[in-house]
Amino acid sequence: MLLKLLEKIDRSKFEFIIVSLTSKGYIGERIEKLGYKVYPISMGKFPSPWKFWKLVNLLQELQPNLVHTRLNHANLVGGIAARIANIEKVCWGVHQSNISFWHNKFFTILTIKVCALMSKRIPCCILTNSENARKVHVDIGFSSSSFHVIPNGFDLTRFKPNYRSKLSMLKEIHLPKNTILIGLIGRYDSQKNHQGFFDAAAEVSKKFDNVHFLLAGDRIDDHNASLKKIIKNKSLEKKVHLLGFRRDVPKIMASLDVFVSSSVGEAFPNVLGEAMSSGTPCVATDVGDCAEIIGETGHVVNTEDMKTLALRIIELLNLSFKQRKRLGDTARKRILEKFELNKIVSNYEDFYLKLIQGSI
């Protein structure tokens, strides 16, 4: 979302400088190609005092009107550094709805707890992309009066229906034209609940001989022994295609008959909006703002109920091609009306101006 914001925002009004606490990474390189400066601090998992003071010195040198940090560790480390550097306006970014011990690392939970204690002292406001994430964080002690919500936005010129994408994908993975493709895109992480996805996939596979499952994302490849074990235990080896990290997500989304999100923790998942923009009906677990994103254009089920997840996928696959296309067109229209990228970027611009001017 940061990359999409930087691609579209009015650069005659704003000058952005990006600081990464780790490396530039793939997104940082893309941001640089847009003409922005990107400073990697290379802190590692536990920030050293020297790297922390490197950050403080950088902020003192830049003296920005506003520091907007994104995600838990950046909120804490970047927020403290900004205050030491005498930056008056600091905005935290919160993008997570599941903060349970079962699905997060201890250090992440500890960071969130400390942020809750510091939320009335460091940031002048907290921006989130999800009403659910706002509620979850307020419930554990974050300052309720500081929150503002701007949802994620989607580029409908980039994500759009394209039947040729499916033909291309089927050719790539050597499958016939009558194959049904069901997809999940996301990194390998406990919150994405790949086990639950394959529990549902096994049930769907019993009903449709020609169904196959596409997965893409970081660590979604044949080198992931844990993932391969889950697939083998469900006897899905011949039905699953692990694509790894891909840069052609619009093509993948447009190739799918149904997109599935089995996550146990999300705030505002980009993948749902991307799939819907591509005219692909979705079935998702009821986490974050998924129900608000999907509306009546797909199905939302309880996070623990993979049997119902499978039934809702089957229900969509039992629709005729025209019925499923009509549902996908409705999903795309919903994104256009509520989450179109230019509208969301305009909301960010208004928010930043009001924050800098002191009216927030």
Image (cartoon, grey):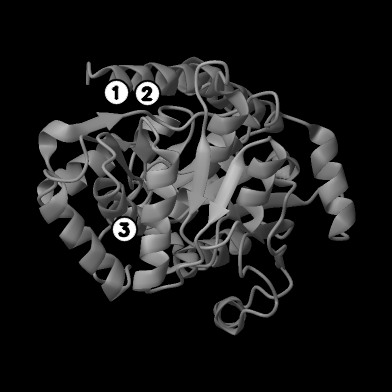
Give residue 70's position: percent from left, percent from top. 39, 46
Element at label 1: helix
In the picture, measured across the screen, residue 228 lies left or right of residue 247, that is left
Residue 352: image tag:
2
Give residue 201's position: percent from left, percent from top. 56, 62
Work out how far the residue at label 3 is from the one at label 2, CA to CA, in angstroms: 21 Å
Mark 1 or mark 3: which comes first in sequence?
Answer: 3
Q: Which residue shows up at 40% across the image and 41% down it?
A: 268
Q: Name the quadrant containing residue 36.
A: top right
Q: Name the quadrant containing residue 229.
A: bottom right
Q: Are marks 2 and 1 in contact (CB under 8 Å)?
A: yes
Residue 327 vs residue 57, the one in the foreground: 57
- Identity, as a three-letter code, of the amino acid under mark 1: Leu
Give residue 72's position: percent from left, percent from top. 32, 55
Q: Which residue shows up at 46% across the image and 44% down it?
A: 269
Residue 329 vs residue 46, the one in the foreground: 46
Q: Is residue 116 above or below residue 274?
A: below
Work out how far the residue at label 1 is from the one at label 3, CA to CA, in angstroms: 21 Å
Work out how far the residue at label 2 is from the one at label 1, CA to CA, in angstroms: 5 Å
The 10 Å Cα crowd at callout 3, few under 14, some 14 to 19, many 20 or more, is some
Residue 55 vs residue 222, the one in the foreground: 55
In the rendered image, which residue does mark 3 sit on?
A: 77
Confirm whether residue 175 shows in the render.
no
Residue 355: image tag:
1
Q: Which residue shows up at 84% across the image and 60% down it?
A: 173
- Identity, as a three-letter code, of the amino acid under mark 2: Tyr
